[in-house]
Image (cartoon, rainbow, N blue to C red):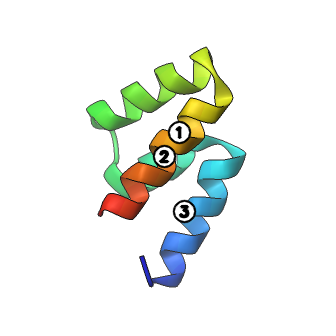
Amino acid sequence: MNEPSDIIKIIFSILLPPIGVAMEVGLTKHLWINILLTVLGYVPGIVHAVYIIAKR
């Protein structure tokens, strides 16, 4: 997570979590899970997005 692009992805993840996930993994199941989590509650979407970005 040392790349400058990761910091940009984290910022997008805080503003709109599915955008950050889409930038990291594209149109995969992780994006759809994040959209669902964001709709159900904004904070779970953020947590999931940051986790996906930090994991890779």
For discs 2 and 1, the disc positioned in front in the rendered view: 2
- Measured from the top left, where is residue 26 in percent x and y? 34, 47
Name the residue rendered at 45%, 47% in the picture.
21
Could you classify mark 3 by the number of other residues whose Cα lies within 10 Å: few (under 14), some (14-19), or many (20 or more)? many
Mark on residue 9? 3
Up-down: is 53 above or below 2? above
Viewer-side residue, 46 vs 35 = 46
Classify residue 7 by image quadrant.
Answer: bottom right
- Measured from the top left, where is residue 13 in percent x and y? 59, 50
Label 1's element?
Answer: helix
Label 3's element?
Answer: helix
Disc 2 designates what residue?
Answer: 49
For the residues labelled 2 and 1, the Cα–Cα distance comes to 7 Å
Mark on residue 2? none
Viewer-side residue, 28 vs 1 = 1
- Measured from the top left, where is residue 4 in percent x and y? 53, 82
Disc 1 designates what residue?
Answer: 18
Viewer-side residue, 55 vs 35 = 55
For the residues labelled 2 and 3, the Cα–Cα distance comes to 9 Å
Name the residue rendered at 63%, 55% in the picture.
12
Label 2's element?
Answer: helix
For the residues labelled 1 and 3, the Cα–Cα distance comes to 10 Å
